[in-house]
Amino acid sequence: MLGISPQDVDSHEKWIAKENFPFALLADVDLTVAESFGVKGNKAVPVKRSVFIVDEAGVVRYRYQGTVKAIFKKPKALAKILAEL
């Protein structure tokens, strides 16, 4: 599991330490990944908050896109989705 956001690596390192985030967090400062997944936003909100589950073959098996203050699926709900793949 990994996360991707448009902030730079320095800000990620600080946030990871503060939140004890246990997963890799990648920097997409030029929004290349956001654009390729169709979640690039606008100047005010550069990336639409999203969750993707991608299988080992690189196929997107699950996609959820929300608003700025989106509440994502709970971990148990995502685990169920993963188990069904």
Image: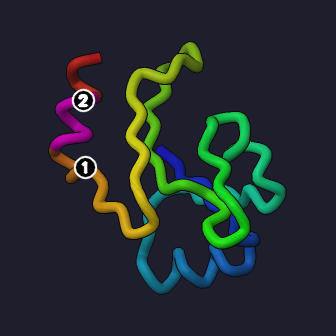
Range covered by the magenta-colored residues = 77-81
Q: Give the residue pinned by disc 1.
A: 73
Given the image, on which type of amino acid does mark 1 rest? Lys
Out of 71 and 13, give the one closest to the viewer: 71
Residue 32, quarter of picture: top right
The answer to whether the residue labelled 1 contacts the one labelled 2, judged by CB atoms less than 8 Å apart, is yes
On the image, which quarter does residue 22 sit in? bottom left
Name the residue rendered at 53%, 75% in the picture.
Answer: 16
- Percent from the top left, x then y, of residue 8? 75, 71
* Mark 1 element type: loop
Indicate whether 54 appears above or below 78: above
Residue type, numbered disc 2: Ile
Q: Which residue is mark 2?
A: 81
- First along the sequence among labels 1 and 2: 1
Dot 2 falls on a residue whose secondary structure is helix
Most prominent secondary structure in the magenta stretch?
A: helix
Which quarter of the rendering shows the C terminus? top left
Q: Residue 69's spot in the image, x, y percent?
A: 38, 69
Q: Position of residue 67 (x, y in %)?
A: 42, 59
